[in-house]
Amino acid sequence: LGPETGAVPDLLARLQDALLPPALPLPARWHALRRHRLRRASRDLADEVSALMRRRRATRREDSPPAVADLLDTACEEGALTREGATSVIVANLFAAHETTAAALSWLLLLLDRHPHLRRRVRDEADRELAGRPPTAADVPRLPVAGAVVKETLRLYPPLWLVQRTVEEPTELAGFPLRRGQRVGVSPFVLHRDPHHYDRPAAFDPDRWIERPDTPLPKYAFMPFGGGPRNCLGTHFATTAMTIAAATLTRDYRISQSPGTATTFDTRTILQPHGLTLDVAGPRIIDRDVLDRSIFGT
Ligand code: HEM
């Protein structure tokens, strides 16, 4: 969408609230109220996104790098997509791609602030391997410490902490009968803290991914990107972007939690550090075009 966000962050938060299943069984008429709230929150978000797209169309300069909205715009002009279709692609991606990665990076920056020795290791690795230039996706294999920090962050704080499936055929799971149509939740957050699979499961220990690569984990013991045929399409993209961001931000900035602020768990649809405020100090301002080029190669 470009740098302008309008009311999108607030409306996304409202939609996340509306999506939350009720903690307790609700009387029937409250369900209607919930559905109404959900519809209104989705409509308001879609309206704001299309308003931003319209504004971008009207004000975009020819020489500015294309944002996703511009690519979708072209698809609309060529008749490959309707305007509503383009808006819903953006709304879906705000959730699936943007909010998830943003939440994971927020946890990562908070964890590196709490573990200065790891921050130093990520910075030293970036200094050594990147020699002051902006990284590209091809550098990622040379940044194992940053990669392990990303993995360990996703283990402890998987942004999608609950993945859901609907039962298609009656079956049984661990002795529990499941009826057709029932919803089953699988929590990566819980699986990732299972002491059967992880030593000191609550500890932030990226070295577990570097030092013990030969101890294979069962397939679904680590699933921040879900599993099965509907797993995350952005797995590789997200880990690449996060590793590059971890290395670059740590190399170029001193990022710390603002004094006197507190963070709590926010377990709406996406697990995020609620109330996190960071102070950023550093000699270089990130040039958006340089960062885009290094991540997207365009
Ligand atoms: C740290 C970042 C991310 C995390 C933790 C994450 C996690 C997930 C999870 C858990 C699912 C559900 C999988 C399931 O139900 O088994 C999912 C689905 C999906 N993700 Fe991601 N994701 C991230 C980033 C991205 C990015 C960057 C993109 C796109 C560029 C993306 C695109 C998608 C799509 C399209 C789906 C739906 C796949 C389908 O239903 O077939 N995700 N993601």
Image: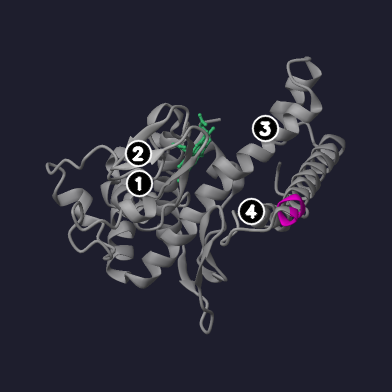
Rendering coords of residue 152 (x, y %): 31, 54
Asked if residue 157 can be seen in this view, the reply is yes
> Which of pointers 4 and 1 lies earlier in the amino acid sequence?
4
**Percent from the top left, x then y, of residue 285?**
57, 58
Residue matched to label 3: 89
Q: Quadrant of residue 201?
A: bottom left
Taking the magenta stretch, the answer to whether it contains residue 31 is: yes
Say which label, 4 or 2, has the lower sequence index.
4
SS for callout 2? helix
Please give the label number shown on residue 92: none
Q: Ligand 1 near label 4 (Cβ, under 8 Å)?
A: no
**Quadrant (top left, top right, bottom left, bottom right) of the C terminus:** top right
Q: Residue at x 50, y 39 (%)?
A: 182
Which residue bears the numbered disc 4? 16
Packing grade of label 1 (10 A; few <14, some 14-19, many >=20) is some
Q: Which residue is mark 1?
A: 130
Residue appearing at x 29%, y 40% in the figure:
220
Callout 4 amino acid: Gln
> What's the distance in space between the residues labelled 4 and 1, CA to CA?
38 Å
Figure check: 146 above or below 50? below
Q: According to the image, label 2 marks what residue?
A: 139
Q: Vertically, is 173 above or below 115?
A: above
Mark 1 near mark 2, Cβ–Cβ under 8 Å?
A: yes
Q: Residue at x 80, y 27 (%)?
A: 83
Q: On the rendered structure, is 102 left or right of 9?
A: left
Q: Secondary structure at mark 3?
A: helix
Q: CA distance from mark 1 to mark 2?
A: 8 Å
Q: Position of residue 34 (x, y in %)?
A: 72, 53
Q: CA distance from mark 3 to mark 1?
A: 35 Å
Q: Which residues are magenta?
A: 29-33
